[in-house]
Image (cartoon, grey):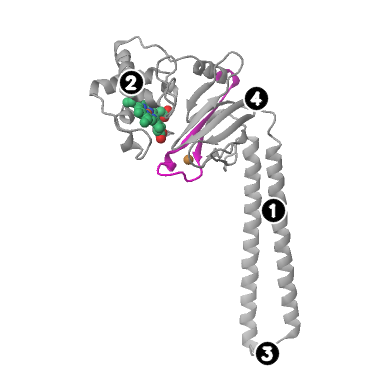
Amino acid sequence: MLRAHGANARKIFDLIWTFGAVAVTTWLLVMLVLAMALFRRHLAEASRSPLQIDSDQESRLIRAVGIATALTVVVLIALTIGSFFAGKSIASLSGSETVIVRVTGHQWWWEIRYPKIDSSHAIVTANEIHIPVGESVKVKLDSLDVIHSFWVPSLAGKRDLIPGRPSELSLIADKPGIYRGQCAEFCGYQHAHMAITVVAESRKAFDAWRSRQDSDAVTPIADEERRGQAAFLGTGCALCHAIRGTLASGTVGPDLTHVGGRRSLAADTLAMTPGALAAWIADPQSIKPGAKMPRIALSADDLNAVATYLGSLE
Ligand SMILES: [Cu+2]
């Protein structure tokens, strides 16, 4: 949030500093006045009895308190107006989007879809959004289970994903890079392991990524990968996962058509490495207890083969 990299995030960043500066200044002034008052009372107590009332001083104090109260109200109104206009100018950024992404929250991962354009298919992936740098991207949000919240602090503010009540947000990244996001609404056991990655890249790299995602999964040629595919299709993985180009078409878990090309596994819980892939498949419950993927017993050879096969799906 303090490292804003997009128009939308910068508006929020300015607001944070304005609120912070006003709050700190107010606090310092209050402390200063308090110190002065205590000091003066200390001097006065020495020279006259505390029961003696000085009516001049009383009316001065009443005036001072009145002015301070009025100033507080003015500051509150000014901050409210500032926040209103920041919200309005964030809203005015929408409408010029060149890319649309649909994000659906699940316990505890993000389903990402890019609707069909021209001759390409709709793309389905998970936990990793690619966007072209400098272009405004419309993110449409929905949830299938509980309330989640989409928050990529360097790029935009938070927006809740409420089941049955679609909402949207626009994202803009003005520098290529990898921006981490996090579910920002407590959504159950593995809420903390529900991160999202936004990869902002040049238009050329984005188009290349898109067309790679658009193709079906590669057909395995090596023996090990063929064995992995057979084990995948034969042990129930396909009930929950889809791999385009094979019979696997489950929708309970992330689409795995290009899983090997992602940067991380299980909503950024593990970095994508051959070892992590095998560890996840061997026992997802020890890595992300409560995750909606059961532990499935595979022989050591099948496990290695499945991990090799999935790793090859880039
Ligand atoms: Cu969540």
Q: Quadrant of residue 109?
A: top left
Q: Report the disc number at residue 232.
A: 2
Q: Are marks 4 and 3 in contact (CB under 8 Å)?
A: no
Q: Report the disc number at residue 79.
A: 1
Looking at the rendering, the stretch of residues picked out in magenta corresponds to: 180-205
Q: Report the disc number at residue 98.
A: 4
Res 173 visible? no
User: Dividing the image into 4 quarters, which one contains the N terminus?
Assistant: top right
Q: Residues within 10 Å of mark 2 (few under 14, many from 20)?
A: many
- Which circle's residue, 3 or 1, is located before the other in the chain? 3
Q: Nearer the viewer, mark 2 or mark 3?
A: 2
- Residue at the spot x=66%, y=41% of the render? 11
The residue under label 3 is 52
Q: Residues within 10 Å of mark 3 (few under 14, many from 20)?
A: few
Q: Are marks 4 and 2 in contact (CB under 8 Å)?
A: no
Residue 200 vertical placement versus 314 (above, below): below
- Which circle's residue, 4 or 3, is located before the other in the chain? 3
Q: Quadrant of residue 243?
A: top left
Q: Give residue 169's position: percent from left, percent from top.
A: 62, 36
**Residue 202 belongs to magenta span:** yes
Callout 4, which amino acid? Answer: Thr
**Residue 168 belongs to magenta span:** no
